Structures are given as C-alpha cells and as structure tokens.
Image (cartoon, rainbow, N blue to C red):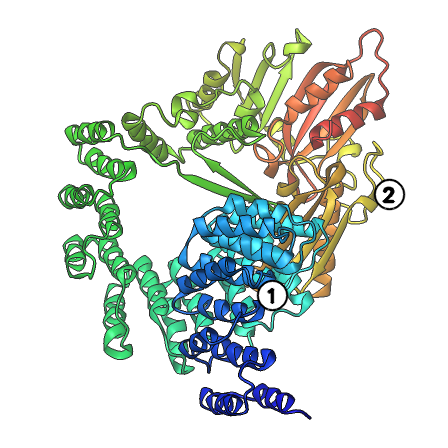
Amino acid sequence: MSKSDTILKVLQGCNSLKRLQKIHAYVITIGLQHHPAISSKILNFCAVSVSGSLAYAQLLFHHIENPQTEAWNSIIRGFANSASPLQAIFLYNDMVSAWAARPDTFTFSFVLKACERVMSDSKCREVHGTLIRSGYERDVVVSTNLTRSYAINGFIGLAQTVFDNLSDRDLVSWNSMISCYSQAGFHHEALKVYDRMKNANVGVDGFTLVGLLSSCAHVGALNVGVHLHRIARELGFLASVYVGNALIDMYAKCGSLDDALCVFESMQKRDVFSWNSMIAGYGVNGLGNGAISIFRQMLMAGVQPNSITFLGLLCGCSHQGLVEEAVEYFHMMSSKFNLKPGIKHYGCMVDLFGRAGKLEKALEIIGTSPSPADPVLWRTLLGSCKIHKSVKIGETALKNLVQLGASNAGDCILLATIYAGAKDTGGVSKMRKLIKTQGIKTMPGYSWIEVGDCIHKFVVDDNSHRDYNEIYHKLREAIHHATLLGIIMGALALAESRTKIHPEESSGTHSKHLPQSADVTGVLCELELTIKKVKVVQVIDYQHSLRSATLRISLGASTYKEEARGYMQPLSKDVGDAIISCDISMVGPEITACSQTASFLPSAITEDLFELEVPNKLPSGILTSDSISVTMDNSLSPAHTLVQLVCKDHKGLLYDIMRTVKDYNTKISYGRFSIKQRGNCEIDLFIVQADGKKIVDPSKQNALSSRLRMELFRPLKVAVVSRGPDTELLVANPVELSGKGRPLVFHDITLALKMLNTCIFSAEIGRHVIGDREYEVYRVLLDEGDGFSVPRNKIEEGVWKMLMGWA
C-alpha cells in the first residue's frame, strides 16, 4: 500500500481537528500536500465536519493551486451552512470568475442554500439564469433547491413554475413543494399538491405527512388529517416522533382533543415538542385546567419546559379566566426556569387581564413589557375594551395604534362598536370620518369549510366560487329561517351597525335582502310542532296549484282560536296575495284520533316500513341492495368506532343517517363525506356511545348496521293505490326531516306529477304514527280525467326520484 493510500485511510477515521492537524503536518513533511485526493479530503473535513474549522479550511483552500470543482464545493458548502452564508456567495462569484472549474449540481445546490439564508432574491435569479445556460434546469436536485430558495424569498409563483417544469420529480421535490406552500401560509395549495401526488401515484414518507398535517391543522381539515393518520398507521410512520407531534397538533387545532390525547399517550417516545403540542392544544381550545394538568405531568416526567410551553399554558389560562394561575406561571418562567418572557407572553397576559375585566392591570402590563410600542398589545387591549364596553381605555388603545402608524379599519370598527354600545353617535361618526380621511381600507376577512376532502375558502361578498349563486341562496335561506326562529337578531344588529360605517359593503347578507319564501310547505315546516293536519282542495290551475288552493289548517283542540290566528301570520306574510282564503277550525275527536294511528292508512304505506331485511329492489326498481354498503371498524381510532358507508347520494341523506345514529343512543364526533362518480358517495363516521366508548358488542354493531342499511335503502315510502274508483298517491316522510333534509315534499310531489302530465284533484297532509315513529303522510288524489294513462309504477318511480333528488 502506497503512502497516499495509507494517509487516505487514516483520514477516513479522523474525528477531531487536533488529529487532523497532525496528519496534515505529516503530509507536508513527506511532500504530499498537493495530492488532489488528500488535499480535498483534508479540506472537506475542515469545512463540513462539526469537528472542523472554517478558518482552517479557508487557509487550506487559499494554498491550493488551481482548485477544482470538488474543492470549491467543500468551501462553499461550509460557509452556506455557517453563520456567514454571504461568504458562500462571494466564493461562488470567485469560482465563476476564475474559469478554472465549472459549477456542478452540488455547487448550485450549495449557493442556492446560501441565497435562501441571506434572503437574496436577486442572486437567486442570477444563479437560476446560470444554471439554465449550464444545462441544469432539468436537474431534479438543483431544481428542488431552486424551488425552496424562491419560496423562502417570497416568490412562491416562481417556485411553482420551476416545480411544474420538472419532467422527472422525485419524492424529495414533492415534499419540498408541500413544505414551501405550508411555510408560506398557502395551506390549501399544499393540500392540492398532495392531490397531484396521488394522481401521479407517488408515495409518501414521514416528511410528506408532517408537511401535510401542518397544513391540515392551519385550515381545520380534520377529514384529510384523519385520512393521513390512517396512511401513517398503514405505512408504519407512527413510530416517528415528528409524525406523532404533527398528528397531536393537527387534532388539537381541529378541536378533536380526545384523539390528540390518544396519539400522545400511544407515543413510545416523546420530546418537548410533544408536550408543548398537547399543552397548546388544550390552551387554544380554552381548557386551561387541562393545559395545567399536562404541564404538571411534563415536569414529573423530567422534561424541561421552554418558552413555547409557557405560551400554551398562558393561552389556556387566559381563555378559561384562570388569572391567579396565569400570574404564577408567568413569574415561574424567569424565577424557576430562567426563561425571559417574550412579547407573546406579555400579549397573553394583556389578554388575560382584559378578558377578566381588569383593563387597568392590562395597561400596566403593556407599560412593563419589553416592547410597549408593539401594536399587537394595544390591539389586544382594544378587543378587551369592546367586551367590557370601556370607551376611555378603548380610546387610549386606538390613540397608541394611530401614533405607531399601525391602525387599520378593523381597529376603527372596534372602537365604533364600543361607541355604539355607549349610545355615542358622535364617536361612531368620528370613526367613520377617520376611516375616510385616512384612506384606511378594510382587509377582507375569510373563512373556509371542509366538504369531503376538499377545502373551500370564502371572503366577504365572494363570487369567485363556481357555485356561488347556490351558496348565497342557501346562505340567505339559512339567515331567513334563523331570523324566524329568533336566533340571529344580535348578528343582524351587528351587521346593521357595521353597514352604517361601511354602507357600500356586506350587502349580501343584510336583512333587507333576506328572501321571502313563496312556498307554502316551507312556511308550514316552521310551524311543524303545531300543525297536525293540512288539507289542500279544489285545484283550479295545476301550474299554480299551491297558490290557487284553499288551505284548511287544523290545530289541537286545546288551542284557542285567537292563538291559532297567530300561527297564520307567518304564512300570510310570506305567501301574501297568493292565499285566497285561510279557514281555521277546531279539531274534533275523530280527527285527533286519526293523528295517533295509521290504522286507516292503506297497507302499502304501513306494512314492512321498518323491516330490517332489505328486499332485493324497491317497487320502482330504482335501487338495489348491492349499491349500499355499511361496515364498522374499531381498529383505526383508539377512541371511536369507524362506520364506513357507501351509497347513492340523495336529498336528506345526512339527516337519515344522523336520525338513525341518534336512535341507537350514539353520537357522531366527526366524519368525511365525498361524492364519487355517478352520484355515489362515501361517508366515514367516527362515532361513540353515550358513555363515550366504542361500540364493541357485535350484536349492537349488527343492529346499527342493519338499521342504517334499511334507512339508506328506503328512507321514505312511496306508493300508488286504489281509493275506491280513484287512484291515490301516498308518500310517508319522517317527521324529523320536515323542514330539514326534505322540507318541500309537497312541492317535489307536484313537480314530479307535472313532469308526468298528471294532475292533482285534492291532497291531504297529516301526521301518523307508523311503527315506532311519527310520519308526515301525503295523500294525493290524482285527477283521472280523459286520457289518463300513466302507469302506476311510472308515477311511483317519478315521485321517488324527485323526492330523492335524482330527477
């Protein structure tokens, strides 16, 4: 073995700078200091190793004659990861100018790392141009580093362009793009990258899961998070402390603390971040006592808390009003653990005293904080003034925000709300004037909702969604129904106060724009606890059957006539001129009896309505039992039973499911709903019994599965029967769905019959007990005039499809 080979072997086992210097001295004495392999090995150790020395590496590098690419890469890499990343860029410039060595994949990767750390977007663009000219634009390693550098410098669009131009992406590049979006706050986009990964059949690793779970936590995408939890279990990533921490954070921020705690307790290894995630989870959910309990367990386990630990602890105390405990832990930071409170800790204390109504104490905290000029502290105080209607301190808070140049429209609106509560119209006008004269613009607030695995984001007066017309219609309808029930009067008053300040905004949900329903059944549903029987007779014009009908509404015998007229007011108000006459009459005992029994109803409606054995097909032949699947699994969640449903989507589907689950004394904690092709849907429900435990009894599981299968197969009953010489259509709809899943049943019946060119002679709507449940039964006598020839099975099928939402 030659001397050079021996020295290289010795260098391979070197693990300290002192030993390396001895080897280097020996190399010089035998004249091998210019040996390419030996000089590169010594330089690389000094530049990259944790035991090395950048100063010594720089000295060695300057003694190399005509350094080659490998030597340049070592010194550039060393400085890129050091406290002086700018020096790496200077060295790269020297390399490009020298022309003795050409940059390669590693060179570009290291200098892009330096650009990322010094936040130099101009140098990042320059390097991008160089690597394109050098033919490295398709290199997956270089492009991945370029993507990350652009994203860190704030050019997320350019990062996405570089990523999209990659023809051969590996898992690292996918993970990098997810991380870029997540760290930049574009969490919806991060989840969309995951959708692209699935379409490209790319697997995941622990880094993928951590990035995606972080985005799920920020947007509240619990269903996606549960799906990722399942993948982590299947692929064996739950042993990773990083994945476990990400799962705890996701479940806690999504409000599912039970599952967060289950993940925490199942972790074989925990670090300080595991404890912090659990404490913060209790904190953000307002459970201060829970946060304190976890903190005490943390200390008993011998884990040293850090500043993040106390931030979660103070947050929980603030939300629960634990003032004394919060003060104790705030002082404990410095006295016992030698941790200096930061501005966020002071912000928690301001919020704590503000929520508790101790506004003067909150002012004192701001004065003693290390940054009394921080606008977050004053804005927190202003929010507390709104809660306690303190005009004086509210004015002080806004004055400081204005002096700091940090005031915005939201601050002015907060103080205007305080003025409005104090009946100070002059103050409200002053805030309105301030907004206009200062040219302050309102930053639009936004919210998001998870439907299935898809996250939809909305801003004020948003019309960018493809279904925005339907969304706004449903929103106005919900506000209208809530207004009738007296639920949102305070919210409407707040909207009215806000409109006085910004009259040009928020027209979409203002009370004057609330829709006036013209459908009789919609109004009747609002009074469903009172109405026992509705009779519609003498249809003059089929196309306007409801509007030209006479309604006879019968109420319980104990109801006074004057009180009954009060129930007619919503009907008259909403339908208006559409009503020709309203007749109110007392109910006789024979009609009351009819409401309590189904004995006089045809057997087509009453028989086998709740049979648990699903027949092969409905009379209409629309649905088969093969299209419905109900399975239960206790292995996925430590705290819940998973119910997986596969069926065809129909109107009122979720209410059918919730009603059945409720009947079995169980509750749904959370779930996932997704629409597939051809109207099919998949539903995952995580349920627990009333005692908070899983359903482990096989008989209970079978009973619930059978009942769910029956409810999904036949949620309502449709039949066409003979009524003497006439033909009658019968529809039985569960009362629980009236005004909810299928509120406009009679509307759908008339529409279906219209499509079949079949007219109505008369109709009755009554409530009857069938089996163990109360039903709304619609009895529609069909007009069999000249030429009536529609087969009964076609009528059943047409009405069924319309009621199910399949027409």
Q: Is residue 664 something that shows in the picture?
A: no
Three-letter amino acid code at disc 1? Answer: Gly
Which label sits on residue 276?
A: none
Q: Is residue 414 something that shows in the picture?
A: yes
- Residue at left offset 17%, top offset 45%: 400
Q: Nearer the viewer, mark 2 or mark 1?
A: 1
Q: Nearer the viewer, residue 618 or 464?
A: 464
How many circles with numbers are drawn on the protein? 2
Q: Is residue 716 above or below residue 110?
A: above
Which label sits on residue 616?
A: 2
Q: Position of residue 137 (x, y in %)?
A: 62, 51
State the SS at label 1: helix
Q: Position of residue 198 (x, y in %)?
A: 69, 52
Locate the C terminus by quadrant: top right
Q: Nearer the viewer, residue 753 or 235?
A: 235
Three-letter amino acid code at disc 2? Answer: Asn
Look at mark 1 in the image and give the residue it sits on: 206
Q: Is residue 482 above or below residue 347?
A: above
